[in-house]
Image (tube, coloured by chain):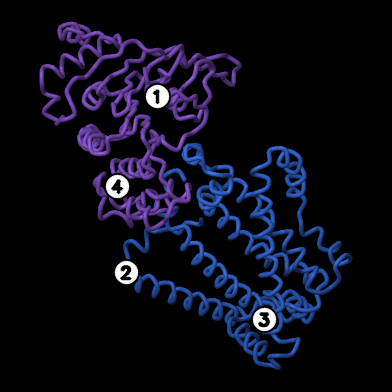
Chain colours: A purple, B blue
Amino acid sequence: MAAALIEVEGVSKSFLTIGGETVEALRDVSFHVEAGEFLAIVGVSGCGKSTLVRIIGGLLPASAGCVRFRGEAATEPREDVGIVFQESVLLPWRTVLGNTMLPLEVRRRSKPLGDARARSLLKMVGLSGFENKYPFELSGGMQQRNAIAAALSTDPAILLMDEPFGALDAITREQMNVDFHRIWKESGKTMVLITHSIPEAVFLGTRVLIMTPRPGRIRRVIDAPFGRERSLDLMSTAEFASLTGQVRAALGLESWPLEALSNSAG
Amino acid sequence: MPRYPKSLSQRWPPLATLLVSVFSFIFFLAAWEATVRVLNIAPFLIPTPSAVARALYVGFTTNPTGSGSYLFAAVSTYAAALAAFALSGVLGVLCAILLAHSALGERIVMPYIVAFQTLPRIAIAPLFIIWFGHGALSKVTLAMLVAFFPVLVNALVGFKSTGRGRLELMRSLKASWAQTFWLVQLPGATPYIFAGLDIALVFSILGVIVAEFVGGQEGLGVLILQSHFAIDVAGVFSVFVVLVIVGLALRGLLQLVGRHFLFWAEAQSGRAL
């Protein structure tokens, strides 16, 4: 059997706090990511999701276990992996276009080609016309679009995203979800998305991996079999509701009856 | 970066703001002149603005290329100050780069820097006259020593405050040390470096004047001393006028250059850098 695109095998991670205590962030996390799929990893804050994405991205060494790309062990950042961070990391002295081209500049790619590619990517993320603006002239959502365009500029096979929409308001976030679904469809890339939004995970993911905290471990993996054509209407369907319910249950969240809430409030 | 109160300029049109400044200055001078004349204050205590203006005129027009003229003295002072400013800027930033990238170096050097900072550096001036003589060399070295530390300390803070996210981004792109430095650390530190240069400019002029007081043979500091010995207070004041006007012009120039580099920092001031 051919190796999966990404294999995460028994990854554990412990940190030493300043107080000298050992904190177990991840325990024995194993999963595969197949080429072209959209894996959404969902969990509450502090369940080690960001640590996991840093280990996959080669920014942080695992305490135990390993990460393999196409069967080959990886311990440092790779050229075929683009990372989008929680806070959009844009350099404020560079224009939108300049920020999009930063990864290309670091890899010393040809400037004219990079310029053309960056412009087409900005069009794809809906930022055409903003090429010469500066990050401080953009809204939070637009900044994150810019960061996504930058991560895509080197044409990585895999995009790792650490809560890219976490800082956005709910309405902007839904719009970003729709747009990002389209970007995944059009680019054909393999996506790994970390999120704490259940609807976001189910809407975007072809598979949803549910993590529980302290120590972070995988509780369950659920398929989201809605195909590659998804629109916001999907969120109003019964199938969608039933799947988000399953995720919620797997996360261990209770569905409280309304009477219980009004009783405790009274 | 220094901040200017915005309230007045926000409420008033620019021309009105300018007129208010000009007229209040004229009123201030007139009130000064009138007070000194009416109270009959001795000219060797407080001179009238008109006497200062006269001293200024005489200083610049009498034998303008001779060694006693204001022009000659100003060139001597500001040439030394600008040389010291440039040297302290370059050396300060270079040392900050070295210290920012070497924890051991910082551990070894920093105690001396802190100790040296507590020493009023002007107290070393007489020593520098012994070591480097009465000429331009002692002026430049003393001024450089005074101006160097604000640049070093500010730049060091600037280099060390590079955001973790930015460093992680560069690491994820497998950027080299030099790329991380040129693309992220140096531009990110420019607001701090300019804040240091702003102080260094004032300090380098201060250092040169002090060196001239202690043992200089030419320059504005020497002119002040000469006027002082002649009990020519108007003369002393007239040199102050030169110092203020040139000082303002140089700072204005530096801020103009700074604004060109720092538009982004001003635009997002209020947010974390």
Q: Where is mark 3, residue-wise?
A: B234
Within 10 Å of disc 1 (Cα), the crowding (few <14, some 14-19, many 20+) is many
Amino acid at dot 3: Ala
B51 or A251: which is nearer to us?
A251
Q: Is residue B135 left or right of residue A187?
A: right
Q: Between disc 1 and disc 4, whose residue precedes?
A: 1
Evaluate whether label 4 is on the same chain as label 3: no
Q: Position of residue B232 (x, y in %)?
A: 72, 81
Placement of B196 over or under B165, stated as above or below: below
Residue depicted at 21% across the width and 17% down the height: A244
Amino acid at dot 4: Leu
Q: In front of the other: label 4 or label 3?
A: 4
- Please state the chain letter of the residue tagged with numbered disc 4 in the rendered image: A
Q: Where is mark 1, residue-wise?
A: A6
Rendered-image quadrant of the C terminus of chain A: top left
Mark 2 secondary-structure assignment: loop
Whether the residues at callouts 2 and 4 have beta carbons within 8 Å, the answer is no
Kindly report the distance in space between the C-alpha atoms of the residues bearing marks 3 and 1. 82 Å
Whether the residues at callouts 1 and 4 have beta carbons within 8 Å, the answer is no
Mark 1 secondary-structure assignment: strand
Placement of B76 over or under A51, stated as above or below: below
Q: In front of the other: label 2 or label 1?
A: 1
Placement of A172 over or under A20, stated as above or below: below
Q: Where is mark 4, residue-wise?
A: A121
Mark 3 secondary-structure assignment: helix
Mark 4 secondary-structure assignment: helix
